[in-house]
Image: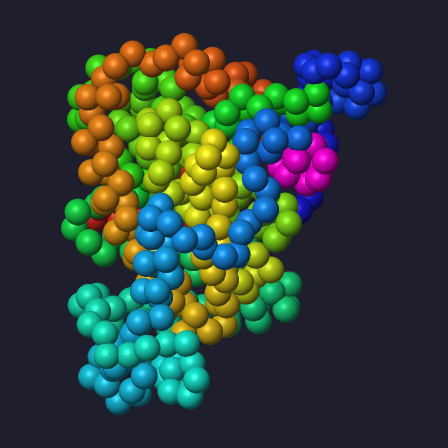
C-alpha cells in the first residue's frame, strides 16, 4: 500500500520524548500508522488492543455465538451436492461449471461438510449470486493479468454478497455502507496522534426513535463513531470491511474494530462482538470477531475463504447470514438497556472518549477518499454505479 507522506504527519505531536517528536513528525494518518510496526504496537497498547489474532475459539458462554456460526457454515441441505436438483434449474450457461465444481467438492469423501439440514428458502437464490461472483472474479483476474483490473472490480465480490444479505429480507435491520470515516478512541502516543480511520465498507445496525438516546446529548456524542453523521439515529457498527494487503490491511481492520468496540464500551454492551472482513491478495477473505475480554480487546479468526471456491463462498455466505441474524439479537439487547442508557454519562467515560478531531485529520487527511460515502444498497434502489 502506498503512503502519501505529505498527508501522514503533523508537527505538534505530544508525548514524553519531545526530542523524538522534533526529529520525526508525528503520525496523524491511520494508513501510515498501520504500516509502522513499532508505532502501531504502541498505539494498540494505549487502546487496550491485543494484537494477536487468536485462531482457536475459547470455551465459555461468551463465545457461543462464534462457535454457533462456525458450526452452521458446514451444514448444507442435500440438494446442494446434486447437479440435477430443481434448485439449479435456472442457471445461466456460463455458471454451470461453477455448479459442477461445487457439487464435485461436496461429494468428496472425508469433507468437513454435513448434509440433510434444512435451510432458509433464499439459499437457492444466494447460490445463483455466488456463481455470478465466481464468474466475475475469474473475469477480473484475467483483466488484472492484462493490466485492466481495478480495486472497484476486485471488491465487487464481497460488496455483492454483503449487499445481498442486507437486502434480501424486508426488515432492513442492517445497512451496508461504502467508504466510512470512523472515529478512534483517544490513544495518543509520543509518535502518533490519529483521530479517525477510513473503512472501505461497514455494516450498521440503525436504531431509530430510541428515546433514551434521543434524550441524552452526552450519550449521542460519546456513542457516535461515524464522522459527520446525524447523531439522532443510533448507528451501531456491527461489521467493518476492508480490501487491502494482508499486513497493513489487517492493522487498518483492527483500528476500525477498535472504533466499534469503543462504541460498545460506551453503550455498556461489552459482551457483544464486532466483526471484521478483509479481502486480501485479491483471492482470499478473512473473517474475524472481536469483543472485550477482561478489560482488553481480543480478536478471533472465524475463518479464511477462497474466492476461487464456490463451496468456500457458500460457507462465507452462511457465516455472513449468521452475523446478520446476530444483529437482531444485539438490537434487542440495546433496546432493553434503555433505562441504563438514560442516565448521565460518567466523567470517566467522557474523559476516555474519542480522540479530538480537526479539519486536517477528520478524513485521514485525504479528501479523495471521502468520495462515495453512500449506501451500497438502499430499500428500492438498484446497485449504485461507481
Residue 116 is situated, as x and y percent measured from the top left of the image, at 23, 79
When the figure is inspected, residue 266 is found, relative to residue 368, above or below; the finding is: above
Count of number-bearing discs = 0
Taking the spot 31% from the left edge, 24% from the top edge, the residue there is 230
Residue 39 is covered by the magenta coloring: yes
Task: State the residue in front, 50 or 213.
Answer: 50
Task: State the residue in front, 211 or 95.
Answer: 211
Q: Quadrant of residue 136?
A: bottom left
Taking the spot 48% from the left edge, 65% from the top edge, the residue there is 305
Q: Residue furthest front?
A: 60
Q: How is the image coloured?
A: rainbow
Q: Quadrant of residue 172?
A: top left
Residue 336 is situated, as x and y percent measured from the top left of the image, at 18, 31
Magenta residues, start to end: 30-41
Instruction: Report whether 162 appears left or right of 243.
Output: left
Residue 285 is situated, as x and y percent measured from the top left of the image, at 50, 59
Task: State the residue in front, 111 or 147.
Answer: 111
When the figure is inspected, residue 266 is found, relative to residue 148, above or below; the finding is: above
Instruction: Report whether 118 appears left or right of 28.
Output: left
Main secondary structure type of the part rendered in magenta? helix
Q: Is residue 122 visible?
A: yes
Q: Is residue 258 visible?
A: no
Taking the spot 47% from the left edge, 13% from the top edge, the residue there is 351
Residue 160 is situated, as x and y percent measured from the top left of the image, at 37, 58
Residue 242 is covered by the magenta coloring: no
When the figure is inspected, residue 137 is found, relative to residue 265, above or below; the finding is: below
Instruction: Report whether 234 appears left or right of 209.
Output: right
Taking the spot 77% from the left edge, 14% from the top edge, the residue there is 18
Amino acid at each position: 500500500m502506498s503512503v502519501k507522506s505529505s498527508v501522514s504527519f503533523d508537527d505538534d505531536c505530544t508525548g514524553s520524548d519531545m526530542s523524538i517528536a522534533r526529529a520525526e513528525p508525528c503520525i496523524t494518518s491511520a494508513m501510515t500508522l498501520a504500516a509502522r510496526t513499532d508505532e502501531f504496537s504502541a498505539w494498540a497498547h494505549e487502546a487496550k488492543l491485543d494484537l494477536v489474532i487468536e485462531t482457536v475459539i475459547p470455551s465459555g458462554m461468551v463465545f457461543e455465538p462464534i462457535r454457533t456460526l462456525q458450526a452452521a457454515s458446514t451444514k448444507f441441505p442435500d440438494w446442494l451436492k446434486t447437479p440435477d436438483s430443481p434448485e439449479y434449474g435456472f442457471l445461466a450457461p456460463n455458471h454451470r461449471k461453477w455448479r459442477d465444481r461445487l457439487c464435485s467438492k461436496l461429494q468428496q469423501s472425508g469433507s468437513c461438510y454435513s448434509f440433510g439440514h434444512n435451510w432458509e428458502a433464499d439459499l437457492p437464490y444466494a447460490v445463483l449470486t455466488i456463481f455470478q461472483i465466481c464468474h466475475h472474479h475469474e473475469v477480473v483476474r484475467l483483466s488484472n493479468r492484462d493490466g485492466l483490473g481495478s480495486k472497484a472490480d476486485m471488491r465487487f465480490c464481497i460488496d455483492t454478497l454483503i449487499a445481498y444479505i442486507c437486502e434480501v429480507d424486508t426488515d432492513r435491520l442492517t445497512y451496508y455502507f461504502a467508504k466510512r470515516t470512523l472515529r478512534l478512541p483517544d490513544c495518543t502516543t509520543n509518535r502518533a496522534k490519529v483521530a479517525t480511520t477510513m473503512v472501505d465498507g461497514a455494516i450498521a445496525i440503525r436504531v431509530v426513535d430510541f428515546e433514551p438516546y434521543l434524550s441524552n446529548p452526552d450519550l449521542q456524542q460519546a456513542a457516535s463513531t461515524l464522522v459527520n453523521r446525524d447523531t439522532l439515529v443510533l448507528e451501531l457498527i456491527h461489521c467493518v470491511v476492508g480490501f487491502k494487503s494482508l499486513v497493513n490491511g489487517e492493522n487498518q481492520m483492527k483500528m476500525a474494530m477498535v472504533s466499534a468496540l469503543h462504541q460498545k464500551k460506551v453503550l455498556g454492551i461489552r459482551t457483544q462482538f464486532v466483526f471484521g472482513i478483509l479481502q486480501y491478495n485479491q483471492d482470499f477473505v478473512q473473517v474475524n470477531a472481536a469483543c472485550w475480554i477482561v478489560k482488553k480487546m481480543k480478536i478471533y479468526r472465524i475463518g479464511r475463504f477462497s474466492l476461487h471456491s464456490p463451496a468456500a463462498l457458500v460457507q462465507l455466505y452462511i457465516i455472513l447470514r449468521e452475523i446478520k441474524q446476530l444483529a437482531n439479537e444485539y438490537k434487542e439487547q440495546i433496546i432493553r438497556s434503555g433505562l441504563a442508557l438514560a442516565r448521565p454519562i460518567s466523567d470517566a467515560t467522557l474523559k476516555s472518549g474519542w480522540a479530538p478531531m480537526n479539519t486536517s485529520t477528520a478524513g485521514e487527511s485525504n479528501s479523495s477518499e471521502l468520495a462515495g460515502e453512500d449506501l451500497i444498497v438502499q430499500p428500492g434502489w438498484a446497485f449504485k454505479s461507481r
